[in-house]
Image: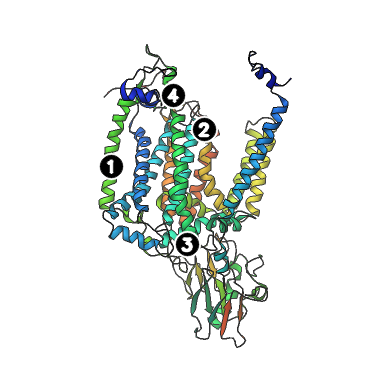
Amino acid sequence: MSQDTLQAGGSVPLDSNQPSDPSRRFWVTTACAVGGVAGVATAIPFVGSLAPSDRARAAGAPVEVDVSGIAPGEMRTVEWRGKPVWILRRTPDQLKDLKLVDSELADPNSDRPGFTPPYAKNEWRSRKPEYFVAVGICTHLGCSPTPHLAAGDGPGLPSPWEGGFVCPCHGSIFDLAGRVYKNKPAPDNLEIPPYEFSSDGSHITIGIDEENKA
Amino acid sequence: MAGDKTVETTGLLGWIDRRFPLTSLFKEHMSEYYAPKNFNFWYFFGSLALLVLVIQIVTGIFLVMNYKPDGQLAFDSVEYIMREVPWGWLIRYMHSTGASMFFVVVYLHMLRGLFYGSYRKPRELVWIFGMAIFLCLMGEAFMGYLLPWGQMSYWGAQVIVNLFSAIPFIGPELSLWIRGDYVVSDATLNRFFAFHVIAIPLVLLGLVVAHIIALHEVGSNNPDGVEIKEGPKDANGHPIDGIPFHPYYSVHDIVGVAGFLIVFAAIIFFAPEMGGYFLEFNNFLPADSLKTPPHIAPVWYFTPFYSMLRAITADFTWVLAVCSVLGAIALFFRGGLRGSWRIAVPVILVVLAVLLRVIDAKFWGVVAMGGSVVILFFLPWLDKSPVRSIRYRPTWHKYLYAIFIVTFLILGYLGTQAPNATFNLMSQIGTLIYLGFFLLMPFWSRRGTFKPVPERIVFHAH
């Protein structure tokens, strides 16, 4: 018996102990479910509007850098996609010393995926041993490590120190190939961005390589 | 007139009371809210927190009138407020000092709760609403700190947003979504501004109302941890150990307000930067996305948690994994867990130990930092002591509280310092003490010889 007839009668008071009307219960549930779906659907544009805008996505244009003027041992920082990218021209001594610290490193051969393109998966982590190109953002929480390029002991540096980078935020240490030291908060070696040399070798274009075309 | 409510009041107040429960609300929450008569100075900090909230909202409204949430203009607009807007420096210093004082007051308010067991049944929801307020405050403070767009603003936000990238699988996409760009940028600044001035304050106000309603439903605790509602009552049914909040405690709290304002004004006029603790020196340099300052640290109120984040290294996860396995063994043989819990909890702990070694230490740093805040939510169920107040606990419990407070302060200090090997070891020990204090609380809090709790509150009039 439907409760409608009871109410329509008017004279009979509604018995609150009576079990709920199954047909009404079904429609209440359905209305809640449909309303809930509508609520979730409404949230989609709001959640989506927080994602990077088209302008932010388009801002990642490649950057061309003249590297012919960089002296051995000198480092230059350029901006690519809002991030600092380091170009360090390593001296022969610095290249030779890279091997010395292998045992101190968490991932000396850059085996962990995602941070090293195939052409940089070598001892120097670069296309040409001399030129080290890396995103200067710590793989821990995104600070920019401070260069301590000169070898020799210093406060806060491991001993012996062959040159590298120290993150001021949480103390992660990287060698001159951007490889992270063991037992530091950063899990990965510094990211090597996609880059290419011009045919005469005097310029580097950051942001394009065999897989990433402009 | 038909349908008119009968009320005792007359005139304008009567007109209102027939339409809105003004007098009865005032009675319920002020003049007939009976609070225990033995409150001490620790009970100032609740009303002081409300005062600071009002200061922050009023000064915030006036700051927004001149501030520009724009990556190009933000830093200069803050300098404009400081140098050219009439009284702008005062309003800005009130807001920046207010942020730090908010945390001073709230930490002392929480410590009071810890001392007197104010979170114990039936006040669990008072505590949980309070903890939600604390979370909102942390979000509010963090997002507000980005707005001046200085070096510390920028790199602090970079680090904290990147915390989310440590979450396995969804992390990198999540932090990208939070920033709205590949690095902290104008998009990030604008959304943080929206959250700081609209979204979080609205939630915060709602939670403050819920906190007070929950408190007035169950009644205030007191330094003795004795329920006044269970004691003797007067002819009107009010507990005789209670006194009306207004005028007794409203006047009492004015003493606290006066003391607070003396300190507050002294800081604003004589040390608004507080030696780099309230306003960090690096934040007087405009944000530079290419160069992290040589030393970055969050503002002092985040540093205890920040120290725990830094403490978790790959080696230290071994220590945590061993602790986890030992905990599993102890719980299995001696824990007193019943039924399937006796198997399930140790198994979960062993799985945790394995995961500690499988997932990067970076993730566990974030878990330690988040967990050290989240664990406070569970305090009402972690504390198994038969008495509420520290006054009637065994003396060695007081030493544990002292160790906990000192550890918290040391962790706070370490978080402001540049990392080195000694400090790292200290913060690792501190992290173990902090987590141990709470996680082992179900075991230590019920042990020892408790002092007899009096039937009624102990109070000697001055």
| Marks 4 and 2, how far apart at CA | 21 Å
The answer to whether tags 4 and 3 share a subunit is yes
Q: Which residue is depicted at the point 61% across and 41% down?
A: B327
Density class for disc 3 (Cα within 10 Å; few <14, some 14-19, many ≥20) is: some
Q: Quadrant of residue B28?
A: top left
Q: Which one is in front, B150 or A34?
A: A34
The answer to whether tags 2 and 1 share a subunit is yes
The answer to whether tags 1 and 3 share a subunit is yes
Q: Is residue A159 visible?
A: no
Q: Position of residue B253 (x, y in %)?
A: 31, 32
Q: Position of residue B122 (x, y in %)?
A: 50, 26
Q: Is residue B80 visible?
A: yes
Q: Position of residue B373 (x, y in %)?
A: 50, 44
Checking the image for residue B186, the label placed there is 3
The residue to which callout 1 is attached is B261
Density class for disc 1 (Cα within 10 Å; few <14, some 14-19, many ≥20) is: few
| Marks 4 and 1, how far apart at CA | 38 Å
Amino acid type indicated by mark 3: Asp
Q: Which-is-in-front pick, marks 4 and 1?
A: 1
* SS for callout 4: loop
| Marks 2 and 1, how far apart at CA | 33 Å
| Marks 4 and 3, how far apart at CA | 59 Å
The residue to which callout 2 is attached is B380
Earlier along the polypeptide chain: callout 1 or callout 3?
3
